Image: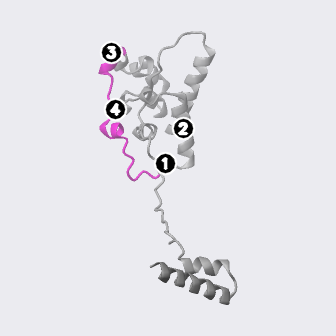
Amino acid sequence: MELTAVAVAAQLDCKIRSELDLELFDSVFWTDSTSVLKYIRNLSARYHTFVKNRVNLIRDLSDITAWRYVNTSANPADLASRGLNVDILLESSLWLTGPEFLCQEQDSWPALPDDVERAKLDGDPEVKQSAPIFSMVVPEPILVEKIAAKFSSWTKIVRIIARLRRLGTKSG
């Protein structure tokens, strides 16, 4: 669900930008899902179809660096998903004004967690495991096999090989 929500956010940003007659600055997106951030940032992993399609959409519609991490405790969207009473929700400063860090300079905003920065996806079930590739080297057919493949008569094959042997001993 979180990956789908991030994809919808990227689509919504693109739609708003195309419809408004305003010059907008760079968008900044926030999520508390470290898994989604790892999917977006990891450029080498191969994902299963559902994840791959959404990650590609997100990358096409937004800049990877526009996606930021917000801790669950500072995420106003989590308040609505927890099933709080409306009275409590309307009294919450987090719900009404957002996290406090948004009023500060960008360099004081939360940094990406270290595991997201490295975008390691070890053991993630959405990452396709690479299958070993086996190859077989077929040796070049020797001269006798080439002659045998070209002529169907046994006597012709024997004569050609005999001539070639005679030529080889004379020149040697």
Q: CA distance from mark 4 to mark 3?
A: 16 Å
Of the pair 40 and 162, the residue shown nearer to us: 162
Residue segment shown in magenta: 103-125
Disc tally is: 4
4 and 3 marks in contact (CB < 8 Å): no
Image point 45% across, 24% down: which residue? 89
How far, Cα to Cα, is label 1 from label 4?
A: 22 Å
Residue at point 43%, 24% (across, down): 88
- The residue pinned by badge 1 equals 46
Front label number (1 vs 3): 1
Q: Residues within 10 Å of mark 1 (few under 14, many from 20)?
A: some
Q: Amino acid at mark 4?
A: Leu
Q: Amino acid at mark 3?
A: Glu
Going 44% across and 44% down the picture, which residue do you hit? 44
Q: Are marks 2 and 3 in contact (CB under 8 Å)?
A: no
Please indicate whether residue 16 sits to the left or right of residue 169 in the image: right
The majority secondary structure of the magenta stretch comes to loop
Mark 2 or 1 closer to N-term?
A: 1
61 over 27 or under it: above or below: below
Whether residue 79 is situated above or below residue 3 in the rendered picture: above
Residue on which the image places disc 4? 112
Q: Which residue is painted at 41% across and 20% down in the image?
A: 98
User: For the residue marked with disc 1, what is the amino acid?
Assistant: Arg
Ranked by sequence position, the earlier of labels 4 and 3 is 3
Q: Is residue 90 magenta?
A: no
Q: Looking at the image, which residue sits at the far top?
A: 22
Report the disc number at residue 56: 2
Provide the residue designation for mark 3: 105
Residue 25 screen position, x and y as percent: 48, 14
